[in-house]
Image (cartoon, coloured by chain):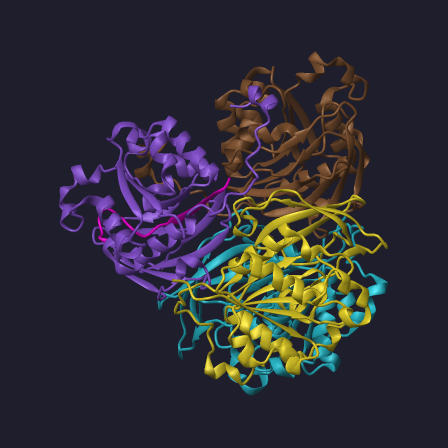
Chain colours: A cyan, B brown, C yellow, D purple
Amino acid sequence: MTAPLRITIWNEGVHEVIQPEMLEYYPNGIHGALRDGLAENLPADSVISTAQLTDPEHGLSQEKLDATDVLLWWGHIAHDRVDGAVVERVHQRVMGGMGLVVLHSGHFSKIFIRLMGTTCSLAWRSDEGGERELVWNVNPSHPITAGIESPVVIDRQEMYGEYFDIPTPDDLVFISSFAGGEVFRSGVTFTRGKGRIFYFSPGDQDFPVYNHGTIRRILANAVEWARPTAAENSVPSVTNPAREWFTK
Amino acid sequence: MTAPLRITIWNEGVHEVIQPEMLEYYPNGIHGALRDGLAENLPADSVISTAQLTDPEHGLSQEKLDATDVLLWWGHIAHDRVDGAVVERVHQRVMGGMGLVVLHSGHFSKIFIRLMGTTCSLAWRSDEGGERELVWNVNPSHPITAGIESPVVIDRQEMYGEYFDIPTPDDLVFISSFAGGEVFRSGVTFTRGKGRIFYFSPGDQDFPVYNHGTIRRILANAVEWARPTAAENSVPSVTNPAREWFTK
Amino acid sequence: MTAPLRITIWNEGVHEVIQPEMLEYYPNGIHGALRDGLAENLPADSVISTAQLTDPEHGLSQEKLDATDVLLWWGHIAHDRVDGAVVERVHQRVMGGMGLVVLHSGHFSKIFIRLMGTTCSLAWRSDEGGERELVWNVNPSHPITAGIESPVVIDRQEMYGEYFDIPTPDDLVFISSFAGGEVFRSGVTFTRGKGRIFYFSPGDQDFPVYNHGTIRRILANAVEWARPTAAENSVPSVTNPAREWFTK
Amino acid sequence: MTAPLRITIWNEGVHEVIQPEMLEYYPNGIHGALRDGLAENLPADSVISTAQLTDPEHGLSQEKLDATDVLLWWGHIAHDRVDGAVVERVHQRVMGGMGLVVLHSGHFSKIFIRLMGTTCSLAWRSDEGGERELVWNVNPSHPITAGIESPVVIDRQEMYGEYFDIPTPDDLVFISSFAGGEVFRSGVTFTRGKGRIFYFSPGDQDFPVYNHGTIRRILANAVEWARPTAAENSVPSVTNPAREWFTK
């Protein structure tokens, strides 16, 4: 008896407004495509909700986060509009065990930079038509790759390339190549506090990558992998009361 | 619907014969205590069997291994009696995804040395009465530590200390201290091929450690963690036919 | 021909003022003891300077940091007095390759938390008289352990124990045990951006640990290990101009 | 004052005999090209020698190995001709601290498989004319990448692709892409015992990759990185006499 999985998909939701032609392939927005993909692949009792930048508290109140097992994060052109207090709230929940799946241009989100401690910069090229990305599985026994054919072929995508300035991941899961010859560590995991984090680069506002069946399956696998360990153990993050006065 | 877990416990079974006083606390042998501990903690449909050195093919025929999801390995004074062909058979199954839990003095087993590539030597001290071991959880979100109080107190145990000559583990899960002041990386994980490996040092022929409720829970957690990924993916270990003639 | 190593030792310098009895064993302050220890063990042409909280810009101007190969950081009760702008400046230098050695209670410094992305909390106990710490080498081929006997015996020290909430280190170098039975990952390395980081827990305002010959040798080894790679390579952290407007 | 570096280059030396057309670009054999590349890039006092399969004891007597700081290994079609006793001798030296650089098809050598514990299999394609390989630096602060432009362009090379069945490396240094779209972890490091190991895939009997200036520089960097830690420390691999009788 596993409790139903509670998922929140966060999308800044700006491209949907300023670039309405994307609604052709994402009629319900990026968050809508992500939601549909998870609904197709996760157990039927999963509870999936969405939140956006313009919602009160960006849709990420303490109550909402406390009721979230795994949070997905998609942002691109409005990272600096995200309130620092909300970022800290998300950070605390990750420390406590909430899973986090960071998508594509979310590599430059405040929460990802906060968790990584590095610049999270990368090389990129955004040609009009995009280019072919091949996503290679380099970790065939990892739960995130269960049932995934390798390589995953994405016909058109923005190039993200190395050097990707992140700490050494716990697990390197996918490496992508691009038609231009670049490579990218496109699927990587981290543990921070008790929280499991998966960064996955495929997916963009200009190309309908989140409609791709295999990409949807990978994201569902990632959500299941990132959920908190079922039985909570008795090793809380230590807070030494006597210390609190000198730390923030 | 997860398929029932199929577990084989391998015990060399020599101390039970040459040191019958141990049957006071392990009346059914070390393998019997391990079996009871797993039966207490795993789903009721789990299939648990045992095998010993003196069984034909050490109880590890190809058919048996093919029907094993996770193998536990306990050996001490008869490592060199284990047939190399059986070791290779176990190795191939680990490459293909079978989980392996190596216990205590199994650090010097042929299969563990074969998988690690190092000497697997360590420091040790075997006083008559043993000494107190404290097992500290240093990985509180790891599935193997789910529900485990830290530290686990083992009143009497043989000291195993650093330097433990193993490759850097994938995950460091437990660190032990001993009354004498030594420390030991007592719970460590590795992935080799598609197989997940957990080495766990507590447990000895001279002290009834496998009757300890928390140790039993840890071993059950480890078995669940080590089971092969449910859905097999399509990235077989590559065998290039043209190459086979020059490799063994 | 290696260029002379340029080291800056940062000490908050508050205990020296409010707890002057410590000047008995650290007559020139904690920074003075650290400086003497490095001077004893590093090449004679090394340039060692010190900086404190009360110096202008905490003694860490851009010019100073640009002329620093490795920075040591000791802080305890005044972490929150450290200016965030200086922390960002140090962070950028680490991204660019400056080495950083974080000492003892510096685990709660702003710069360490910024680089780790976790809470960096730990368990601790501060008895009047301290207790024995044994520092065990678990990485005998690491440059930081060159020439170090194991274990290093520290007669009196404050206990720091697990769980230590940090990301998985690149290298686990030392594990300590305490008379009370606790264990601690007391020497760990990380790479963040191009910078190498070593956290080392022995050392406290109440016990003269930095006068210990072996501890001094370890710190000198760490400084040499953390220096930037001699020949700069041509892979800068990428800054994509078109992106700068949406990131901070 | 660092002692001169003592390097042994091992080449099976079979292609030089059966495929003499390769002597056009490697007039002194593969080992000759490797020797020239190291001589160009290492300190002038380095001592570089070569050894081959047909030498007595394959040129790797105990005396020779004891006087070797770093061993390079190139083999392809005669792995099974390498005497197991020599492999064990090399293995023991790696355990004791000798560096090892394994090249290209050496992934299937007995010594590499012995050290990795996995199958070391990979995907490959050998077209007549080869194809373009781009070698990307994903670890810009690593000593092995010092002074290396990224990517390194190799005009013609045999494709080696994922899945590469190795344990998770200590450091992932290079990732290659091929004209066919494949990716490969082409530069990876491991520590086994006290020995440092670098596997580097570029280099083949059919293409003059070891004449490439940047490849030569990478190999020289790797040799310097792999040399044993200068000052020996006092943590020997433990051999417990009482245990020797039950291990091999």
Report x, y in % for residue D216. Answer: 29, 55
Question: For the stretch drawn in magenta, what is the main secondary structure?
Answer: loop
Q: Which residues are magenta?
A: D193-208
Left-right relation of A236 to A125: right
**Residue at image point 51% right, 53% down:** A148
The answer to whether D226 is drawn above or below residue B70 in the figure is below
Report x, y in % for residue B176. Answer: 72, 41
Quadrant where the image shows the C terminus of chain A: bottom right
In magenta segment, residue C55: no
**Residue at image point 18% right, 48% down:** D26
**Residue at image point 36% right, 47% down:** D5
The quadrant where residue B213 appears: top right
Left-right relation of D50 to B60: left
Residue B116 shows up from this direction:
yes
User: Farthest residue in the bottom direction?
Assistant: A18
In magenta segment, residue D202: yes
Toward the viewer: D164 or C82?
A: C82
Residue A69 shows up from this direction:
no
The answer to whether A53 is drawn above or below residue A152 in the figure is below
Report x, y in % for residue C108. Answer: 72, 66
Toward the viewer: A19 or B185?
A: B185
Toward the viewer: C10 or A227?
A: C10
